[in-house]
Image (cartoon, rainbow, N blue to C red):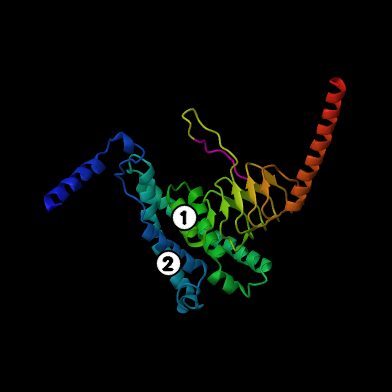
Amino acid sequence: MNRTAILEQIQKNVERLSAPDLPEYKYIPLHQKPSPSVATLHEIMRLLRTVIFPGFFGTEQEAQLGSIQYYTGVYLEKIYDLLQEQIYNGLCFEVERCCDSKDRASEISIAFINRIPHIKYLLSTDVKAILDGDPAAKSMSEIIFCYPAVYALLHQRVAHELFELGVPVLPRIITEMAHSQTGIDIHPGAQIGEYFSIDHGTGIVVGQTAIIGNHVRLYQGVTLGAKSFTLDEEGLPIDLPRHPIIEDYVTIYSNASILGRITIGRGSIIGGNIWLTHSVPPNSKISQSRVEEKIHGNMILFEKRFRMFVQMTLRCFP
């Protein structure tokens, strides 16, 4: 094929791919507004990580008592400047006009800065919870520096605050950063209490409307998901509470799936590989063996009733 023929084929596809109104592409809108920068959000999270865990992810000088306040101030100012721009882009991403978004982005950015001390407190409790529950952990420093759970929780707790402040798009990008790095998928809308512990973590999924209390521990592969969702008149899902409520001091072992707007009572233990779609009272212990025993008991009851039915049928129709 000569060069002219090649260019003709390319031009034909250019015209097709550039057409804004072809029916087969109707679910891919033409985006003509500012978009958030993933690279800048990575930088914001790097700076936040440095501020919240001083000395671990920066230089030794940044954590010295004589200089920590100076560096914290420099980094917070930089976080504000970068975040304001990204929030503005996020607000424009979701609306038709951006004329009022600059002031709104500034207000949200400073409101977020004011929440960083609380984020640091929550992460401090998470580190303590992980240390208390993992004999393999030698120190809090090791947990902060090495554990993927801390990385994932840093991103989720930051994203959750932005989510609560009404920022579009950015919270989801931030949690997906952690998801891609750790395999831990926690929606920014999920409400998580103090002293939250994730052990191993790979494959954990926590849905948007999940509520997790204090002193809760999840192991790898746990799903806190939706069983079903309600549709509107156009057949689109309605954003209603649809994920579990996990009360305080609950432990959920690996690969358990807890689905729907159910409540796991305080102090309960959910064993591995459990499929749970109903609420359980406080201090429950749900294990695979107990589920199997219940199924076995139900089978025995079914067989007994079936034999009685057969006997009655034979009497009526000898």
Distance in Å between CA atoms under marks 2 and 1? 23 Å
Residue 18 appears in the picture as rendered: yes
Residue 45 lies in the magenta stretch: no
- In the displayed structure, would residue 46 be above or below residue 292? below
- The three-letter code of the residue at mark 1 reads Glu
Based on the displayed image, in which of its 4 quarters is residue 317 positioned?
Answer: top right
Give the prevailing secondary structure in the magenta stretch: loop
Q: What is the x, y in percent for residue 237? A: 50, 36
- In the displayed structure, would residue 14 be above or below residue 249? above
Q: What is the x, y in percent for residue 194? A: 63, 58
Q: Residue at x 62, y 74 (%)?
A: 139
Query: In this view, which residue lies farthest toward the top?
Result: 317
Residue 240 lies in the magenta stretch: yes
- The three-letter code of the residue at mark 2 reads Tyr
Residue nearest the viewer, comparing 296 with 168: 296
- In the displayed structure, would residue 109 be above or below residue 9? below
- Stretch in magenta: 237-244
**Horizontal relation, residue 252 to residue 187: left or right:** right
Query: In this view, which residue lies farthest toward the right?
Result: 315
For mark 2, give the secondary structure.
Answer: helix
Camera-side mark, 2 or 1:
1
Residue nearest the viewer, comparing 158 with 68: 158
Q: Which mark is residue 176?
A: 1
Residue nearest the viewer, comparing 26 with 158: 26
**Horizontal relation, residue 254 to residue 155: left or right:** right
Q: Which residue is mark 2?
A: 75
Residue 81 appears in the picture as rendered: no
